[in-house]
Amino acid sequence: MLHPRANESATVLQDGRVLIAGGWVATGKATNTAEIYDPKTGKFTATGSMHSARVDQGATLLKDGRVLMTGGSNGKYRIASAELYDPSTGKFTLTGSLTASRVRHTATLLSDGRVLLTGGFNTTTSSLSTAEIYNPSTGKFTKTGGMTTGRAHHDAALLPDGRVLIAGGDNGKKALATSEIWDPTTGKFTKTGSMTDAREWGMAVTLSDGSVLVVGGCDTDCYTLDSAEVYSETTGTFTEVGAMDDSHFLGTMTVLSDGTVLVAGGATGDTVLDSAEIYNPTSETFTTVSSSLTQPREDDAAVVLSDGRVVMFGGDDGTVDLSTIEIFGPPTSAT
């Protein structure tokens, strides 16, 4: 990449290119710079800069092809501003502000094209229970029903019926096992089944059958977890599945074209990992990928390209922020 980055965002654009924005740079400062990765050429080019430096921001591809950046931290303060990246111009423009400053929140694209933001931290150490909706047609954020508990470092996953599962995180004091569902027809959150393990910084993806896989993260004492569980939309409960070979904290998780799931990098305790493994939804087990990452990395960003390959951008190796990337694939010959 043009800059070393950790805690940045990476978003696949409608034309297949990837927008990488913000993050920590090698100087230990948040950046407002952005760049474009073109998988056809394998090259990076600079694009317009954001109006604010951002780390741990939300980055959501809207249905019209623009990318919504929400909140995050500018390196000193949690921020409430939001902006839109337009691939046709290569520029960021400000849009309506959030109803509250948020960092380490979730931003989920809804079936109708709006975006649901939940939780996070603002100017205090207490996590937020508030939620809000961004409407691209008006450019404004409006409050929706509040969560049943404050959460940050939590997971969000869109369910097939248009509802959103919110799971785990922490309330500013301890990791949570509880989860809840936001219903777009009512704008309200209701409790659903709890996870087997309390976890924050976990990773969640929606599987092809509509269930949600949640893995890794850490507990209240920041003991990293190797456990994994699956949420059933039908029963409203979590079921534990086979454990990972390594505990993955601050890694990445992506759904591959064949329906399996790649978990890569992150850390186990104080050790940054170069390992990766594949989850098979049929056997409900993990298998270690035979080839390791080219280097240990955590706090990186990963996306699935249109050809099925996975690209991992930047992160850090436990000592310095990284400008390197690596590609995993094709999935059919990777395990």
Image: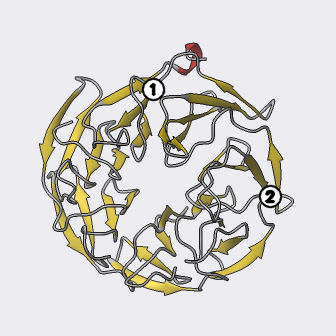
Residue 329 in percent (x, y) is at 48, 20
Can you give x and y, in whole percent of width and height, for residue 15 in the image?
31, 38
Labels 1, 2: front one: 2
* Position above or below: 48 against 183: above
- Establish if 224 lies above or below 154: above
Answer with mark 1 or mark 2, whichever residue precedes in sequence.
2
Q: Label 1: how many residues lie within 10 Å, few (<14), some (14-19) or many (20+)?
A: some
Q: Judge left or right: residue 234 versus residue 53.
A: right
Do residues under tags 1 and 2 come within 8 Å of each other at their CB atoms? no
Q: Quadrant of the N terminus?
A: top left
Q: Quadrant of residue 17?
A: top left
**Picture disc at residue 309:** 1
Q: Give SS at disc 1.
A: loop
User: Up-down: is 48 above or below 268?
Assistant: below
Residue name at image x 64 percent, y 63 percent = 162
Quadrant of the snapshot with the C terminus = top right
Which colour style is shown?
secondary structure
| 48 vs 267: above or below | below
Residue type, mark 2 in image: Thr
* Horizontal side, residue 68 vs residue 201: left or right: left
Residue at label 2? 196
Front-most of residues 263 and 50: 263
